Amino acid sequence: MLRHCVLLTFKDRITHDQISHLSSELARLRALPMVSDYRFGPDAGLAEGNADFAIIADFPDVAAYEAYAADPTHQAVLSTTIRPLISERTALQFNS
């Protein structure tokens, strides 16, 4: 299994409605056939300096991750919903 982890830091003045919209758009990605598991949510606020939001996606293999990365639905969520909200993104993939 391959796990894809993303941490997002939002730009200043992001609203609750924008975060709610982000969550509903991310929920659509759970239905993509190559995704084994897809979880996301805002930081719990337990430590200073954390990112604002996390996305964790599991895939059966590298090919499934690559198909997800190129998927038109995923690309649309990236360009229209995620990128306009963030000042920073950090990601990694590891075998789990």
Image: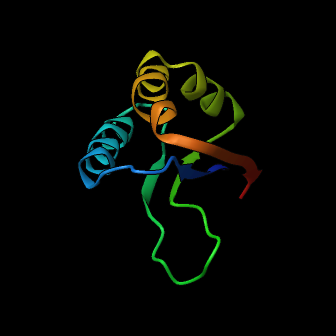
Q: Position of residue 29 (x, y in %)?
A: 39, 36
Q: Nearer the viewer, residue 81 or 14?
A: 14
Q: Position of residue 86 (x, y in %)?
A: 53, 42
The residue lying at 40 percent from left, 51 percent from top is 13
The residue lying at 64 percent from left, 45 percent from top is 88
Q: Nearer the viewer, residue 12 or 81?
A: 12
Q: Say left or right for 48 vs 36.
A: right
The residue lying at 26 percent from left, 50 percent from top is 20
Q: Position of residue 44 (x, y in %)?
A: 45, 76
Q: How many marks do you count on the picture?
A: 0
The residue lying at 30 percent from left, 44 percent from top is 18
Q: Nearer the viewer, residue 40 or 47?
A: 47
In the rendered image of this protein, does residue 50 appear above or below residue 33? Answer: below
- Taking the view exactly as shown, the residue that stands out farthest to the top is 72
Q: Say left or right for 23 vs 52.
A: left
Q: Nearer the viewer, residue 4 or 78?
A: 78
In the rendered image of this protein, does residue 8 appear above or below residue 52? Answer: above
Q: Say left or right for 12 vs 30.
A: right
Give residue 56's quadrant in the image: bottom right
- Taking the view exactly as shown, the residue that stands out farthest to the front is 13
In the rendered image of this protein, does residue 87 appear above or below residue 70? Answer: below
* Screen quadrant of the C terminus: bottom right
Give the colour scheme of this rendering.
rainbow
Q: Position of residue 52 (x, y in %)?
A: 51, 60
Give residue 77's quadrant in the image: top left
